[in-house]
Amino acid sequence: MNIVVCVKYVPDAQSDRTFNDSDNTTDRVGVDGLLSELDEYAVEEALKIVEAGEGEVTVLTVGPDQAADALKKALQMGAHKAVHVKDDAIHGSDSVATSLVLAEAVKKIGSPDLVITGMASTDGTMSVVPAMLAERLGLPQVTFASELTVDGSTVTIRRDGDAASETIVASLPALVSVTDQINEPRYPSFKGIMAAKKKPVEEWSLADLGVDASLVGLEAAWTKVESFTKRPPREQGQIVTDEGDGGTKLAEFLSAQKFV
Amino acid sequence: MAEVLVLVDHANGTVRKTTAELLTIARRLGEPSAVFVGDGFDAAKEALAKYGAEKVYRVESADVTDHLVAPQAEVLAQLVASASPAAVLIPSNSAGKEIAARLAIKTESGLITDAVDVQAGDGGGVKTTQSVFAGSYSVTSTVTKGTPIVTVKPNSAAPEEHAGAAADEVVSIEVSDAAKGAKITESKPKQATGRPELTEAAIVVSGGRGTGGDFSKVEDFADSLGAAVGASRAAVDAGWYPHTSQVGQTGKQVSPQLYVACGISGAIQHRAGMQTSKTIIAINKDEEAPIFELVDFGVVGDLFAVLPQATDAVKAAKG
């Protein structure tokens, strides 16, 4: 079973995330970045599947030079090899263009049995690239898996929705996105960190993928950010310490605000 | 006036509030046409007419309802081609966003997700507002290619009644084999709690680590206010409350009129899911808890003492 895991290098949510003033894109350079936390679950799940059988896990990212850090973390966890698509023309790409580049890279890697992604990135949080990628690759998609089993030619997942818990079956090859409920991602071991240094990382440009540069980047985006405004911080309201009447004071506040 | 397609969110014909919100927004952009997939149209018709749907496209094929999102994207792509709508509005839940994603690729159209406001653009099209980076920025965007496809978050508009004809038109669809690749083989309904749906509720009361696993006081207080119950990631990871109730980056993003955080410290992960609430209240033993930075009203104290007293006072006030 060969698996491709798509990962994203994102600005650390603990830092002050912001935009580039010049073109309204997310600042990915001036802010500390890392492997999107939600992608660790995808890497872990791929490793578990391969460890229980055979095959290889390839991690794939599209992003600037610094995105190599995200690949390194995945290799340290145990992925076998990595592919980094980088090209100045990609800067400012929207989800549509990103899914195009990912799709061409997955094809070039070879036809994997499974493509696994996280449930969302922690920066854009759109959750749409998995569906777009499945559409472009012509694969069935089974998303938001909180349990996953692979059995010969099918993949079965459980998904916990608001109204029901569903079992969904798809034939392989397929695309799966996994939630943060599916496993507990491992920490890289010392051995894993050392081994990662010798693992192959391929760097591909758009030309290597045969993708026309005019189809990606900010100019090619099908949506445009007109403006961004920092929301003023919320002003702290009234804080009371409970001295036996905290609940009463809370109810009084609710009445004053017409909630009761 | 051009049509605006609204994908109806319903359970066997019971139309959710988000659909009334989307129909209200659709009227700003053109003439609302609802797209109704599944059974129960007769039950839904009145609600759709009440909020201004002039037309309803009906799809009842089992090929569409038994499979995941791909067939619904094919339905909408067919309608985009035949009706040339001014925009397509879809509820911003996980299925809605995936349908929108596939539709965007199929129709070569720009996609905006999680909009909290949608207005007609200056030169036609749409102008959307999104809340990003855990609610710390507000971003306005436009769609520059194709038919604008927008997924809209719950509570983004107050539903306004406006009589529509809701003339139904049955749409026949040949679902491609590729779209049938993922099949739902089993569906176990969740037990109904009798409380409002988390993302749609006007009031949300959430519990965290401070509950120690006992949500009874949180639930009692929520019920006194007619509120939905949420949980922090810590409470969900501990197995105290179901993941579908999780508020935060990897759970639900809520934006109610009132949010009450009980025993929740307020990590960035949680803030991402509730920071845009209109009024925020917190109860926490730790006066240093970061959640207090956000609140309109805070009580430093034990939730097991504060909540029962508040519950009794609310009940008394309501008579």
Image: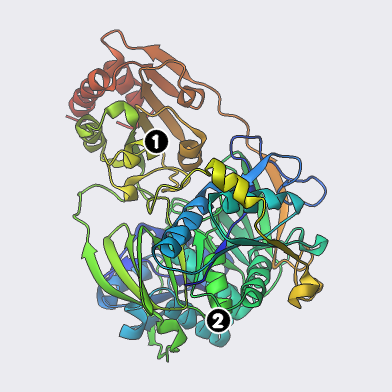
What x and y, as percent, mark residue B40?
Answer: 26, 75
Circle 1 residue: B258
Secondary structure beneath dot 2 equals helix
Secondary structure beneath dot 1 equals strand
**Mark on residue B319?**
none
Q: Dividing the image into 4 quarters, which one contains the C terminus of chain A?
A: top left
**Comes first in the chain, label 1 or label 2:** 2
Say if B179 sits above or below B87 in the image.
below
Q: Could you tell me the amino acid type at mark 2? A: Val
Circle 2 residue: B80
What x and y, as percent, mark residue A203?
Answer: 74, 63
Q: Residue furthest top?
A: A243
What x and y, as percent, mark residue B116?
Answer: 54, 52
The chain carrying label 1 is B
Which color scheme did the rendering employ for the protein?
rainbow
Horizontal relation, residue B200 to residue A24: left or right? left
Q: Nearer the viewer, residue B86 or B191?
A: B191
Instruction: Tell me which corner region of the image, top left, top right, bottom left or bottom right, holds residue A229.
Output: top right
Q: Nearer the viewer, residue A105 or B220?
A: A105
In 3D space, how far apart are the residues under numbered discs 1 and 2 (Cα atoms)?
A: 38 Å
Instruction: Tell me which corner region of the image, top left, top right, bottom left or bottom right, holds residue B106.
Output: bottom right
Say if B167 sits above or below B18 in the image.
below
Say if A146 sits above or below A171 in the image.
above
Q: Is residue A121 visible?
A: yes
Q: Is residue B27 visible?
A: no
Q: Could you tell me the amino acid type at mark 1? A: Leu
Horizontal relation, residue B80 to residue A46: left or right? right
